[in-house]
Image (cartoon, rainbow, N blue to C red):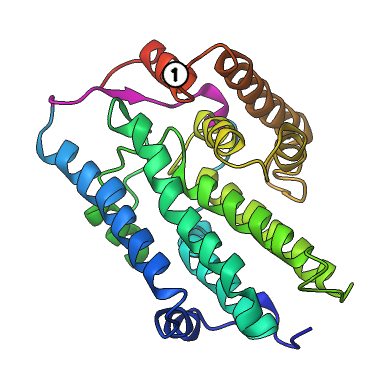
Amino acid sequence: MSEVLVSEVSASAAVFSIIGSRQLRPAALRSTASIFKNFFFLQYKAALLPGRYPVSRADHRLDQKIPFRPDKVEIYLDFLHFFIRVQGFLIRTFGKKVHPQTRDFIAALGEVYKTAAAVYSKNFSTTNRPRYLSKLRFAVIHAFDPHLMCIPSLHVMVLILTYTRFKKITHDPELNTDPAIQHEIEAVRSHALAITEAVLYIKQHSVNCISAAMYAMTRFDNNFPPEEAEAFAGSLFADADDIPDMDKEEIRSYILGLYRQFLERGRDCPVWETPLLEFLDTLPKV
């Protein structure tokens, strides 16, 4: 195994490796186009045409039990770099033999954005985030993020995609036989959890958004079955010392309960997004 850890991989170097590969470049360009179409263009269209599209408030009372932590913004903003670093680690560790799996991994990113847009294009959602401008990074977020795509949380969907696909690829016996990789699998999952927590700490999302993202990923990808979703939600805030244990348990229980409701309702629906759209319809409108 490479002596370099995922956390030590340069995101810039990883981008150059991907763009420089004839096998990986097409998937990267298609995913980038999907991000612009299904996130930036779609969201700005709604922001510039207020009243044209329904917007629901996704807040929940349990959000108030999670303190506002501006210091978590650096972790929050790492979510896309995190995805790229994982690609860089795979390429650096396994070379060209991992290119087919990495290509599919990168292509899945674009599909995740397209999947989430099936909900956003019908009903946008927002949360009551503090207008905190004391840090430059928050000022940038407020200036460039209309904050209309909360349910499901794309941040959390990308994080789940990242750690589950990394685990699947590195468990392939034809690709890797080094048991030491387990440490990196655990590190990647832990960082995915840390960014998910940061999403809640800086009030970019509500607990409702986490459940919705987990449901979306279970429907999107068989690498995130219900048992994995239960373990993921059950690990949130495990090491947090700024939330009482009773509140942590209530938060995790609610996230899992709502996830299970979406999953149960989805079994009877011809299209996967119906449970989320029905839920959004019950929420107050902006």
Where residue 86 sits in the image (x, y, percent)?
60, 70
Q: Which residue is mark 1?
A: 274
Left or right for 245, reference 178: left
* Along the line of sight, the residue nearer the viewer: 81 or 23: 23
Quadrant of the rendering where the C terminus is positioned? top left
Q: Visible in this render: residue 89?
A: no
Judge whether 205 appears above or below 27 on screen.
Answer: above
Helix, strand, or loop for circle 1? helix
* Along the line of sight, the residue nearer the viewer: 259 or 14: 14
**Is 30 within the magenta?**
no
Left or right for 222, reference 199: right
Quadrant of the image occupied by residue 251: top right
Where residue 166 sits in the image (x, y, percent)?
67, 62
* Along the line of sight, the residue nearer the viewer: 109 or 144: 109
Quadrant of the image occupied by residue 250: top right
User: What are the residue bounds of the magenta stretch?
Assistant: 51-64
**Is 57 within the magenta?**
yes
| Residue found at x 49% / y 54% | 108
User: Hey, which residue is sitting farthest right in the picture?
Assistant: 179
